Amino acid sequence: DGGITQSPKYLFRKEGQNVTLSCEQNLNHDAMYWYRQDPGQGLRLIYYSQIVNDFQKGDIAEGYSVSREKKESFPLTVTSAQKNPTAFYLCASSMSRGQDEQYFGPGTRLTVT
Amino acid sequence: GQQVMQIPQYQHVQEGEDFTTYCNSSTTLSNIQWYKQRPGGHPVFLIQLVKSGEVKKQKRLTFQFGEAKKNSSLHITATQTTDVGTYFCAGPKAAGNKLTFGGGTRVLVKP
């Protein structure tokens, strides 16, 4: 089956620890995105990547880092510098351009205490 | 910067009734997309509108793109409990490399 996978579904960490969220797609999409969603809120863009080995900051990149070493993979690291890391994190991909429809993974719910 | 606003933020609907949710952009959009997120789930693409004044239907859902390509609407007829969820509109940023999502309309259906 083609799609986007994110793991794990739930993640618990202690404050001060870095944590990496996985995102893999087998849709052969060029573009990938990371969003943050807080309870009852919309989607805020963290980082996005149009091609391998290149990525750009979104609207709320502070405290996060990404890499795009392979077309299929776009992991997100939530660093200890992120002040309020507890949230629902969604990864998405689109065929090529930002104007194309986006396909979302199931998300990772991160809780930091 | 570009902003996309959705109203209402919450919509409580009696089962069987119709309702409309609206999406307004501060800038002209090359296209508008609609997504649905079920409670506890992830957003799922519903439709994309490209042309000025375009109207598309998906069963009980009717999507419209405004003439000026700055607003859009989603009308649902005969609401069912399966319509529960949050409906997001999204439009490309001016540079075209990413989407700006509206805040969503959360739909609750009263049986």
Image (tube, rainbow, N blue to C red):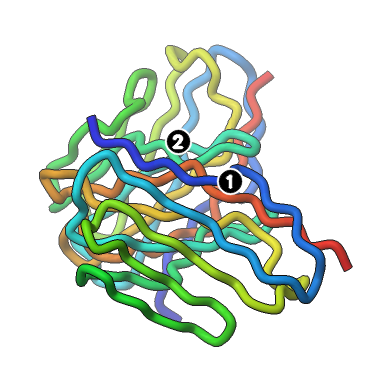
Instruction: Quarter of the image for the C terminus of chain A: give it.
Output: top right
Residue tagged by mark 2?
A: A20
Q: Position of residue A16 (x, y in %)?
A: 54, 12
Q: Secondary structure at mark 2?
A: strand
Which residue ends up furthest to the bottom in the rendered image? B59
B40, above or below A65, in the image: below
Q: Give the quadrant of residue A71.
A: bottom left
| Residue at the spot 64% in from the left edge and 36% down from the top edge | A39
Extreme residue toward the front, this view: B67
Side of A110 relative to A54 (left or right): right
Say the numbered circle drawn on residue A45: none
Q: Residue at x 57, y 40 (%)?
A: A88
Residue B8 badge: 1
Q: Residues within 10 Å of mark 2 (few under 14, many from 20)?
A: some
Image-based side of A33 in relation to B22, left or right: left
Element under label 1? loop
Q: Quadrant of the N terminus of chain A?
A: bottom left
Q: Position of residue B42 (x, y in %)?
A: 55, 57
The number of numbered discs placed on residues in the rendered structure image is: 2
Mark 1–mark 2 distance (CA, rounded to whole Å): 36 Å
Q: Position of residue B22 (x, y in %)?
A: 47, 54
Instruction: Tell me the amino acid under the disc marked 1.
Output: Pro
Disc 2 chain ID = A
* Image quadrant where residue B82 sits: bottom right
Q: Residue furthest right?
A: B111
Closer to the camera, B89 or B51? B51
B82 above or below A55?
A: below
Q: Chain of mark 1?
A: B
Give the residue type that dot 2 points to. Thr
